[in-house]
Image (cartoon, grey):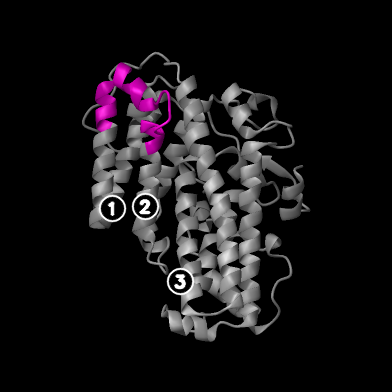
Amino acid sequence: MPSLLKKLLPTRTLASRSVSVLMSIALLSACGSESSTSTTVYQPPVNTDQAVADIIDLLTLPAINDFAQHALALQTASSEFCNNRTTGTLALAQQQWKNTAAAWYRYLPYNMGPSQIADDAVLIEVYAFIEALRFRGNNEASTVRNDIQRMLAGTVDSNFNNKNYNTLGLLALEISLFERISDGSTDSSDIVGAYTDKQCTILSGYNNAMVNRAQFIQQQWRSDYQNSGHSYRDLLINGGLSALPLEDGAAADAKLITSSNEFMDYLHKRTLINDAAIVSGHTWALMNQAITSLQNMIEGAPAASESFADLLQQYAPNDLATLRANITTAKATIEEENETDFYAAVLSLDGNIKRELKNGLGISVGLNFSDGD
């Protein structure tokens, strides 16, 4: 068991979530919205090895590195605010929260392996302690506020790493930094004037818990996954995951399809426009990060030697055109802040991943649509 995870969850056994690989192609075709064009003949498998390696090295790892670094920067900015409580230092901490949330949404299309390691006793995965909304789809703002009020009225919890997942993460930090806990005022002067030493202790606990988990996910991706002595990056790209307990051994391209599909599924099934980053007013900016991250996965990083788009252009150009058109539509709905059309556009992209992207590259994969439910 990794030492950092022992620190996070000291009395529980950990396991990684396995992904179902048994669903049929016919079922996949029935899920999601219909698109204007689709692959009519299942494409024989395309060699995606280089494209996948570039996605992992140039997009996924930088995304989780950014999140870990921004979480640390948020910890520092929060500490500086508490040491000098002014509207200026509060604004800096609030901006750093936005930066951290944006980095998390850039990572979410790659939510697999390290961020899905689960507490075997309660089946709660690491990512849920950062963003509880994804796990069950419940808006936990009232839960967080009640927990803060409880600690302010009594004793602050001694170990935030052991707190329930729905009282931690980005939401807890957002509420702590963007509103006055007594009445929900978002006026900066009201927040600063009401901030107490005890509330700073709570803010520090929230930051410490998120930094610990961010660094844990980063370490598993980069150096030692599940005590194997190998990074998740290497095991994923080199096909070594099947040697580990509870890993399904699915190919790397299949795992990318699965993780990106689950994320699009999350975006259109959960009421994110009403529930995510509401207090901070950062909702639409996060949706833009999400769609841009999916777009980058398909188009490739600027330094990539090969991308999914390159392969689709060669083997399934109509499918690539469909993907690009629907990404453009999704971005337009974000620009217009049109909630109804946004959900419809994301539903289309959800279907495009299962058909145009998967079939266009001949990727064999079974998708898990449970999204944590």
Horizontally, residue 43 falls left or right of residue 15, namely left
Q: Amino acid at mark 2?
A: Met
Q: Earlier in the sequence, mark 3 or mark 2?
A: 3
From the viewer's perspective, is residue 11 above or below residue 144? above
Q: What residue is disc 1 on?
A: 334
Residue with the most extreme top position? 44
Q: Residue at 43% across / 48% down in the picture?
A: 266
Residue 14, visible in the rendered structure: yes
Horizontally, residue 330 falls left or right of residue 305, namely left
Q: What residue is disc 3 on?
A: 91
Magenta part of the chain: 296-322
Q: Please state which of residues 302 and 312 is positioned toward the viewer in this rendering.
A: 302
From the viewer's perspective, is residue 318 above or below residue 102? above
Circles 1, 2 touching at the beta carbon (< 8 Å): yes
Q: Amino acid at mark 3?
A: Ala
Closest to the camera, between mark 3 and mark 2, is 3
Q: Please state which of residues 197 and 116 is positioned toward the viewer in this rendering.
A: 197
Q: Earlier in the sequence, mark 3 or mark 1?
A: 3
